[in-house]
Image (cartoon, rainbow, N blue to C red):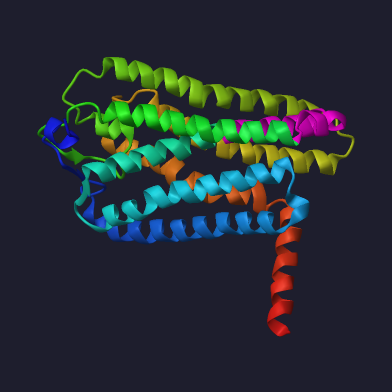
Amino acid sequence: MKRQNQSSVLEFIFMGFSNFPELQERLFRIFLVIYVVTLMGNAIVIVVISLNQRLHVPMYLFLLNLSVVEVSFSAVIMPEMLVVVSTEKTMVSFVGCFAQMYFILLFGGTECFLLGAMAYDRFAAICHPLNYQVIMNRGVFMKLVMFSWISGIMVATVQTTWVFGFLFRGLNEINHLSCETPAALELVCADTFLFQIFVFTGTILIVMVPFLLILLSYTRVLFAILKMPSTTGRQKAFSTCASHLTSVTLFYGTANMTYLQPKSGYSPETKKVMSLSYSLLTPLLNPLIYALRNSDMKRALIKLCQRNVVLHTV
């Protein structure tokens, strides 16, 4: 039987911030600027690392993969979100909602595992510098990257298929900015208890476990930093770790609050703000925190710019 025959809902309506029409024009401008800066920042990281052979080491190749994820994640969410905040109500087809949810989960899940792999890479480099080449060899790097992407695909496939296996009847207004699982579940006309247990368990495994591993890795890193003889080196390392942990906490913290309790008691407006934290701010901040503050990345970017200037003057 076709999906259209199983469900009377053939399209959904995103409500966005329709309750605050006076804010919509301002929000559109802010979101548009964030989207453009996010694309530019992550595109710079991708181009610089791709064109510089010296940066083809695990640390920067992880950053390359993270930027690909961030660009893709933003491309899935932001164009639709800009339409939502610029109109009172935005229509999206059943298939369109399914596709958006799938890719949000795919890129979100992949990012969870990638951030964990990146923390492990820094732990190995700082706490075991003499054995780093052995611990993080090319084979281990490839396995970690492939595991991250394959895990994201599996999470997206299972969860999206399960959600849209429920019946949607009657109400079709999603009081959210995008087609995320918790918002879509509000419209399901069935008992979702087993699915909520699955989401809770999945969130623990996909979000909480990598987050705890990151905290453990950075705890070990901080102890190693405290043993550094140079005060300047300690301050620089502390600054870097604090920036990384801020970004990680923002991403994992808001994702936990959203997905650990799909039908939680948070107000719709609170859920929208939490969603903005990991869908807008994290893709915007990550290239600044992880890459563009890095001295090697700065040098590679300057060299690339100088090369382009020379080519244009010849």
Magenta residue span = 114-137
Asked whether, in this view, residue 229 is left or right of residue 278, the answer is: right
Visible residue check, residue 258: no
- Residue 6 screen position, x and y as percent: 14, 30
Answer whether residue 176 is magenta in the image: no
- Residue 147 screen position, x and y as percent: 57, 30
Visible residue check, residue 11: yes
Asked whether, in this view, residue 253 is left or right of residue 42, the answer is: left
Q: Is residue 262 above or below residue 240?
A: above
- Residue 1 screen position, x and y as percent: 16, 30
Asked whether, in this view, residue 218 is left or right of residue 275, the answer is: right
Extreme-right residue of the structure: 229
Q: Relative to the observer, which residue lies in front, 294 or 24?
A: 294
Q: Relative to the observer, which residue lies in front, 313 or 35?
A: 313
Asked whether, in this view, residue 162 is left or right of residue 44, the answer is: left
**Which residue corresponds to the image point at 62% horizontal and 48% vertical from the top-left?**
64
Number of marks: 0
Q: Relative to the observer, which residue lies in front, 134 or 71?
A: 134
- Residue 101 screen position, x and y as percent: 34, 38
Dominant secondary structure of the residues highlighted in magenta in the image? helix
Answer whether residue 131 is magenta in the image: yes
Q: Is residue 279 above or below residue 193?
A: below
Q: Quadrant of the C terminus?
A: bottom right
Extreme-front residue of the structure: 1
Q: Relative to the observer, which residue lies in front, 25 or 58?
A: 58
**Which residue corresponds to the image point at 76% horizontal and 39% vertical from the top-left?**
237
**Which residue corresponds to the image point at 42% horizontal and 52% vertical from the top-left?**
75
Residue 98 image-quadrant placement: top left
Q: Is residue 271 above or below residue 79?
A: above
**Which residue corresponds to the image point at 73% horizontal and 48% vertical from the top-left?**
56
